[in-house]
Image (spheres, rainbow, N blue to C red):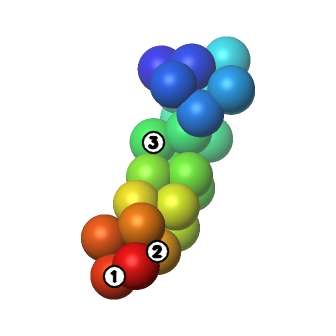
Amino acid sequence: YGHFGRDDPDFTWEVVKPLKWDNKVQA
C-alpha cells in the first residue's frame, strides 16, 4: 500500500506499519 507515500507494500507493511503505527498508537 502507498498510504505512507511508499509504493513498496513490503517496506510499508513490514517497516512503516510497526514503527509508525506503534509510535502513533502510543502518542
Query: Which comes sooner in the sequence, label 1 or label 3?
Result: 3
Label 3 vs label 2: CA separation? 14 Å
Q: Amino acid at mark 3?
A: Trp
Circle number at residue 26: 1
Task: Identify the secondary structure beneath mark 2.
Answer: helix
Image position, residue 19 (x, y; %) = 52, 67
Circle number at residue 23: 2
* Image-quadrant location for residue 22: bottom left
Residue at the spot x=52%, y=61% of the render?
20
Q: Amino acid at mark 1?
A: Gln
The answer to whether the residue labelled 2 contacts the one labelled 1, judged by CB atoms less than 8 Å apart, is: yes
Q: Nearer the viewer, residue 10 or 3?
A: 3
Circle number at residue 2: none
Residue at the spot x=44%, y=52% of the render?
17
Q: Amino acid at mark 2?
A: Asn
Q: Residue furthest left?
A: 25
Give the labeled residue for mark 3: 13
